[in-house]
Image: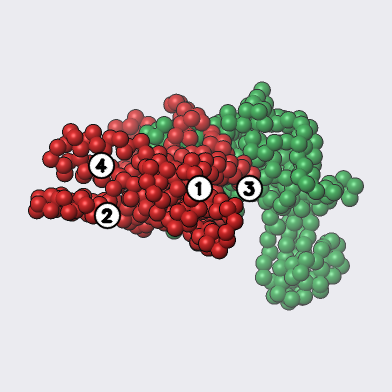
Chain colours: A green, B red
Amino acid sequence: MALIALDQLTKRFPGVTALDALTLELEPGVIGLVGSNGAGKSTLLKILLGLLPPTSGRATVMGLDTARDGTRVRELVGYMPEHDALPPDNSATELVAHLAQMSGLPPAAARERTAEVLRHVGLFEERYRPIGGYSTGMKQRVKLAQALVHDPRLLLLDEPTNGLDPSGRDEMLALVKRTGTEFGIAVMVASHLLGEIARVCDFLVAIEAGHLLSAAPLATFTGQTGVLAVEVEEGSDALAAALAARGIQTRVDGRAVLIGLDGHDSAEHEYDVVRDTIVDLGLPLVRLEHRRHSLEDLFRDRPDDERPVAAP
Amino acid sequence: MTTEPRPVVDASSPREASSAQMPTTASSATGSIFDLGYRGYEGPRLGRQHAVYALFVYSLRSAYGIGRSGRAKIVPIGLAILATLPAVISIAVRAFAAQAGAGAEVERIDPIRYDSYYGYIPTIVMLFVAAQAPELLGRDQRHHVLSLYFSRALLRIDYALAKAAAFVTAILVLILIPQAVIFVGLVISNPDIVGALADNVGSIPPVLAVAATIALLLGSIGLAIAAFTPRRAYATATIMAIFIVPGVVADIVIRATTSGLTRYIVLVSPGSLLDGVNAFLFGTEPQAREVVRADLAGALYLAAAAAFVVVLIGALVRRYQRIEA
């Protein structure tokens, strides 16, 4: 039995089709759900939780129809919402233990699981202090802990790295990965950052404007090496022109010059050319980096007729 | 829930003891993640029923600020003391007077009794409701905590009804403690305890009935307003206005008009309703001017209060069925 099965799943809101006839079967693992903002990710998660009824079609989680058996589904699923959802005057311990009881755990078990789960997400002494004083990273950990506290079979995470600094992102992603691998809990991570998703998941589902763009193992997508961004204080147009003269196609995006690196082997050569060109022109170089994969990269090279059309 | 810090590693627990490594304070400073091994949960899952019960208990406690910061306790506990103090004092005065041989005089000026106490208590309950109903409902809305509740075993209607039941119970506690003080005081300060007991037992049904009416009517007004007004200050102000303004308006309208129909306006004022119900159930005269002037049948007040409670609780449930979470 598939972990998650969608059959012609459609959700319409007044004036917008959030999900359009999604059909999909997913097996346990760490599943990435990518799409830009408004692509329908959060709507899909809410349907999987049984919080929103589909307009038509069906969604099942572990064989349970989410529309009919919502309460049963929610006992087996943990959910980490995208937005801030924590009362500032409770401590992490109080809140998570209370929510564990809301999932049906007896009080003693709720306290025990709370202590354990907070430790797993890396909250120690501070868990007795009011949440209002926590950093964003600590708050995200509390949100993850409350989703894990009842030992769910499936974890639904909506933008778990929202608002985190780079090291916070790394730690959160490591936690998500550990949850999926060591804890043996299936995870679905929704994010608009393909680069982050690619670091933790082994299966990728891409949706855009409610349509299924692709659903495949991550390996299918790793062929893409992304974009090299060269940011200069000034003279980005001159740099683009000079690079074009040396046979490298570029795109100017404000102060940055974007270079598509489509072959692994030739990249070495292109780095040299870029470096030399900047030196020759004497440009003030600010940054030279691989652009983080974003959903746009996935879509950029698609012919127009293959791109998803915006919902009416 | 638990406020006492527990040791990080509890040797008595086999699960904790099985993990050899122990996180230290130094590690918490850097927030690094330890590999302690994850253990699943094999214990009982009590489901929706337990979740509703736990939410009821949690909300009842937090209505009095229990399990919350000291500041959250000031208003509810302070009001509970204000509600009880007159009962304690009057019973004490009565006891001293009886010892000093002036018992008959004090009896004659008629200190606080069950029915007259209800002329005083609605004001305290109104303040309690205006302060604590936004606390009970607004907090979860303001901080978007509802999405954490609704993604669990309990339903939206469960949340609304558990909160309502907890709040009404909290108000009942506020009302019935001073009444219990009066009851015990009247009985034990009387030399003839058995006779006093027999005298006072008859008062219990109306005392409970009026308490239930106050708790249900004022509680459901407060909850219905708080559910639609996440901002605390607005909710408190609106609740107080709904409690006070209609009574004043009703008094003016009844005095200014001569038509018999306008006197029914008194039925939209919570304070007047409670005064009418109190007089009806204790078989005494109403105290509020507008209620005296309206001169309606006592049962009408009870029926109107019941109708309001049904409509308001319905509105509360409906609000939580639709609220964005």
Foreground tag (4 vs 3): 4
Task: Have a look at marks 4 and 2 and say if they share a chain.
Answer: yes
The residue sitting at 12% across, 40% down in the picture is: B191
Q: Residue furthest right?
A: A305
The residue sitting at 37% across, 57% down in the picture is: B75
Q: Is residue A230 left or right of residue B306?
A: right
Instruction: Indicate the chain on which mark 3 is placed.
Output: B
Rounded to the nearest whole Å, what is the CA distance between mark 1 and mark 2?
31 Å
Residue of label 1: B296
Foreground tag (3 vs 1): 1
- Give the amino acid type for the residue marked by disc 4 in the picture: Phe
Foreground tag (2 vs 3): 2
Rounded to the nearest whole Å, what is the CA distance between mark 4 and mark 3?
47 Å
Residue of label 3: B324
Assess whether mark 1 and mark 4 are in contact (beta carbons under 8 angstroms). Answer: no
Instruction: Indicate the chain on which mark 4 is placed.
Output: B
Rounded to the nearest whole Å, what is the CA distance between mark 4 and mark 1?
30 Å
Q: Is residue A251 left or right of residue B152?
A: right
Residue of label 2: B86
Choose between B129 and B265: the one closer to the eye. B265
Report x, y in % for residue B253: 56, 61
**Label 1 packing within 10 angstroms: few (<14), some (14-19), many (20+):** some
